[in-house]
Each structure stands twice: as C-alpha cells, then as structure tokens.
Image: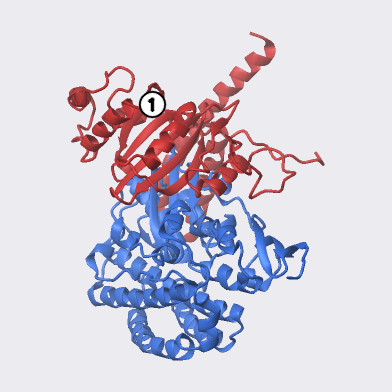
Chain colours: A red, B blue
Amino acid sequence: MSDQEKELTQETKATNIMGEEAVKNEEASEEQGVQTLSNTTSQQMNAEAVKLANEEQGIKSSPNTPPKQESRENAVTKPQAASVPPKKPAATPRPAAKKPAEEKPLEPSRKQPWLDKFVVKLKELEGSEHLEDAFINRANNDLPTLVVKSEWWRTLALHLRNHPDCQFHYVQNFSSVDYETHLEVVVHLFSFPHKERLGVLVKVDRAEAKVDSVADIWDAANWNEREAYDLMGIIFEGHPDLRRIMLTDQWIGHPLRKDYVPYDEGV
Amino acid sequence: MLRTEEMLLNMGPQHPSTHGVLRLVIKIDGEIIREVDPVVGYLHRGTEKLAEDLTYTQIIPYTDRLDYVSAMTNNYAVVHATEKLMGLEVPERAEYLRMITMELNRVASHLVWVGTYLLDLGAMSPFLYCFQDRETILNLFNELCGARLTYNYMRVGGVKWDAPEGWLQKVEEFVLYMQKELATYHDLISGNDIFLQRTRGIGIYTKEQALSYALSGSNLRVTGVPWDLRQHQSYSLYHQFQFEIPTGETGDVLDKYHLRMQEIEESLKIVKQVLDVIKEGPIMGKVPKVLRVPEGEVYTGVESPRGELGCHIVSNGKNKPWRLKFRRPSFYNLQILPELLKGENISNLVAILGGIDIILGEVDG
C-alpha cells in the first residue's frame, strides 16, 4: 500500500466515524427539535443551526450511494430468468416457497399471474436469454417490470409495440438513471387495448453507453432519446437526429451522470 | 405558377406567440411551410439535477417553476410520488383541499389558454375577461398560501396551510359565478365568425399519431380517446366524485377550444362536489421530521391541465432522491408540431402552435 493510499484509507476511516457521529447528532437534534417546539425561539434556532451543521457534515462524510438493486429481488417474487426452464408457468410456487424467510411475508401480487404468463411468452422470442429479470414493483401500484440487456431492447420493443398480445402503443414515461455501476433506460408503457402497464428497465454499459434507438417504433421516443443523450450521455444508435436538446451544442459532459463536473474554462 | 425559392425563417426565441422562449426554424416555400425544427432548451434550469441535492420538501418550490400556469398540479405530482414510495396516509381534509386547489388551478390554466390563444389570433377583449376571472382564482390562492403563482402549498403527507375562515364560502361563490359566466364566454367567442374560420379544420391529427407521440390531456382527448388519469389511474380521492371526460369529434383546434371549455365546467363540478363533503380535520398526516424515503423506484402520473404530468423517483433510502425525472406533458405534446405544420400555410402556424397549449417552463424543465 503506498503512502497516498494509506492516507486515503485513514481519511475515509476518519470520515466514517464522523459520519456516525453526525447521524447520532442529527437524531439527537431531531428529538431536541421536537421538544423545543414549544420553547423560546432562540432555542429553536439553536437546535436548527446544530441540525443544519450536522446535516452538512453528514453529506460530506457519508457519500451518497446508489440504491442496491438486489433489494428488488428480495421484495418481489420473480420467475428466475435464467434457471427456470421456459414453459413452466409454475414459477409462482417456487418464489413463494422462498418467501417465509423474509420478514414480511407478502401475498403474491394480483399482477403476478399476468406477468408469469407474459414472461413465458417472451421466452419464445429470439434472444430471450437477455431477459435478466421480471418482477412486480409493489411500491408502484404493482407494476410488472422487465429488466433486459441493452442488445435485446430493440427486438423487445418491436414485439411489445406490434404483437397482438401486447400492443403497448403508448409511452407513458421515458427516463434514465445512473447507478454508477451501469446506466439504465427506464420506459413505462401503456397498452390501450389491454389496459395494462409495463415497466422496462434497459441496462446499459456505463463506459460505452450505447443502445439501439426506438425512435422509429414510438415517435415519442425521439426527443426523449435526445434528452437522455444530452443529459445522461447515452448514445442511441440509429436515431434519426441525435443532437443535444436542452443544452447548447458546445456543452461538455452530461450533467445527470453522477461523476459530472462542470467544465469551466476559467479554472 | 410563380417559381419561388425556399427561405429560412427564424421565429423566436423572443416572439409573443411562442408564449415563452421557443424557437422555430422554419423552411418556407412561398407561403407554404416545408419543414419546421423546434429548438427548445432556452429555459432549461436543470431541475432534475438540482433535485438530487435537495430534500423532498425542498424540491416542491422548484416544481412551481416548471408549469408556472398550474403550479398546484406540479406540487401534487412530486408529493404524490413521494407519498406512494413511503406508503403514507394523507388526511381526508388535506386531499380535499388539494383537489379544490388543483381543479381551480385547472380552470385558471384553461382561462389563460383561452385568453392568450385568442390574443394570438388577434382578439383582444376575451383576454381581458379571462384574466379578470383568473385573477379571482389567484386571489383565492393568495389568501390560502400567500402566493399568486408559485404556491409551494403542498407537503409530503398533507398541505401547508388550512383554509382560512370563510375561504371555502368564497370558493363556492366563485364556482357559482363561474358556472354562469361561462355563458358569457360562449356568447363572446364560440359563435365568432373570424374565430371559427381561423380554427376550423386545422391542426388535425389521427388517434394513432396521438398515441405514438404519447400526447396526453386535451391533445389526446380531442382525437376521441376518453383518457383521463383522474378516472383511469385514479389518485387522490377523485374516485368519490362524478365527472365526465369530454372528447373531441373532428380533432381540429376549434374542437380543442370546446373541449377545454367543457373541462372548465367539469372542474367546477368537481370543486362543487368537494365543497359539499369537506369537513374539519387535520391537514397533515403522521410524517417524520426528516423524510427518508425507502429504497425503491416509483412512477406516478397525474392529470395536469396539459396532460399526464409524471414523476419518476429512484430512492436509495436517503432524504434526497437518487434520481428524479419529470414526465412533462408539454415536452411530449410539442413533439408533434413539425408533423402538423408540414405543408400548412404560414398564417396557420400561430393558430396550430397555440392550440397545443405549451408552457415553456415545462418543455425545458
């Protein structure tokens, strides 16, 4: 370990301790804040000031970490994409058997049977080994959600748009997230004929952020992909007109990336 | 026929009928529009990036500045998504107050549209009527939360202020007045020959196009799709109340005008029903002092005056969102503009653009 590295680890240790203290202080001051509500204003202001300072410390010492995606799998029943052989709609009982290990045994979602059937059909599609996961997002009104690799996105999109069982003609939302390990394109679709909602999370490599464009499948994706390119730095291959849309053409970097540092010529 | 040369025309970003800072780069051949390229982003403030460094309560005032004509719905969009992720219960009175303010805001927003749209077409007086009535609503809001436009009224778990004494009566008076007053608007506008000629048969698109471009709100309903999130993906307590979803027939801009006028009527109906059932009670639910939103991902859409206003939150369990994305209806609705304008006469440009009802603060985020 070089000296520099040693210094770094010491620093992180120090900041960690500070972080714990900060959290404790914050909690204490929270209580204080509640107690002093009826007291004089000066005390209130003091408590507020302490809390503010602590919060500031908290921010500095404990870095903001991306949400752990494993939690998704714990929270939901999911038919195992890789291990469960296709044409086995009995995928529900298996995760249900895993369930009792959890703290809060949830009843299977009302959407689970629909998703299971849907996934079985998707398995028949070419390239379906790229379907990484399928789960129900319980927090989000039981939204059935698919997790796919970027190389399969276009095939899947065409299927979702055109297949008579899907007919997802409507893009409710088109978003992108930087998880620091990878990027994700998040698309929420709605099917008017079937009255179904579906979330698709497309995992995109962070260093080489490239994914096929779906602007010709849904017109709504056109500007949204430009926005995702502009702010998140995802390159949509095959897009008819991939220019920056919000920022100026000369802008350097993609602001919504977590490691974005504003470029300033003066510095 | 006269031989003409293609000309490049730059409209905006400072142009009164773009309602903000929209720039259109237009290729015209004589009077006919060949191609339009909307340039947006002049009002981009990076709300989504800023939100990553703000606590959930601190984000609320930023949402006021997105769609500044109906800030109440914006407040609600972010508050609703957060509540969903936290699984919070909101007291009944708070929900009712939210609904009253949101629906009044919808009325105000549509009045702004009617007024400024007719101003675009060259009619001055309807604008004055609209803004007079809108002012009544803004005064009501001012009394409620101390601001005319940027309300910062809602909180995660409830609302900030209870209705002051006599406020609900004032709202009721306004609703009764406005229901009658709409007849004046129809007298003034709906039969006007110049207005009819400027708006009839222009800016038509099909249902399929509307769905593919993910248009929402009146821009989608005008094609005959009865799609309203207040009923179909019901939020707040809208399921308790009766209201119609007006749809269009021909899909032209004139239809949009009638549709929005009907929506004002429906909103007033909802407010009236809420006023009948609202009771005294708490206005804030049981909310921890520091909001820590559990890890997870949520997308919720609400029906803003312009369409589906969505909020996509990814939380990592801290007091600040890891990622927050707004699905801004104006941004989606504006996208269809180049297709609508292709081959149109240049004198229809303003009439079609105005019909979409965009707010640039929302387009640019």
Q: Is residue B228 above or below residue A225?
A: below
Q: Nearer the viewer, residue B22 or A108?
A: B22
- The residue at 52%/66% (across/down) is B356
Pointer 1: what residue? A131
In percent of width and height, residue B272 lies at 29, 78
Q: Position of residue B338 (x, y in %)?
A: 59, 58
Q: Nearer the viewer, residue B144 or B36?
A: B36
Q: Is residue B337 above or below residue A210?
A: below
Give the side of residue A92 with respect to residue B204, left or right: left
**Would you place residue B277 above or below residue A56 in this image?**
below
Counting other residues with Cα less than 10 Å from the Cα at mark 1, is it few (<14), some (14-19), or many (20 or more)? many
Residue B221 sits in quarter: bottom left
Q: Residue type at mark 1: give it.
A: Leu
Task: Locate residue B6 relative to residue B309 in the image: left or right.
Answer: right
Count of numbered badges drawn on the protein: 1
Residue B137: image quadrant is bottom left
> Which residue is situated farthest in the right direction here?
A266
Res A254 visible: yes
Residue B267 picture quarter: bottom left
Residue A239 rendering spot, x and y as whole percentages: 59, 40
Q: Is residue A43 visible?
A: no
Q: Quadrant of the N terminus of chain B?
A: bottom right
- Closer to us: B65 or B244: B244
Instruction: Name the side, left or right, on which A221 lies relative to A172.
Output: right
SS at badge 1? strand
x and y, in percent, of residue B363 in the image: 57, 58
Q: Write the residue at 21% across / 23% down.
A: A88
The residue closer to the viewer here, B295 or A112, is A112
Residue plotted at (74% across, 63% down): B10
Identified at 71% across, 67% down, the residue is B14
Label 1: chain letter: A
For the C terminus of chain B, the quadrant is bottom right
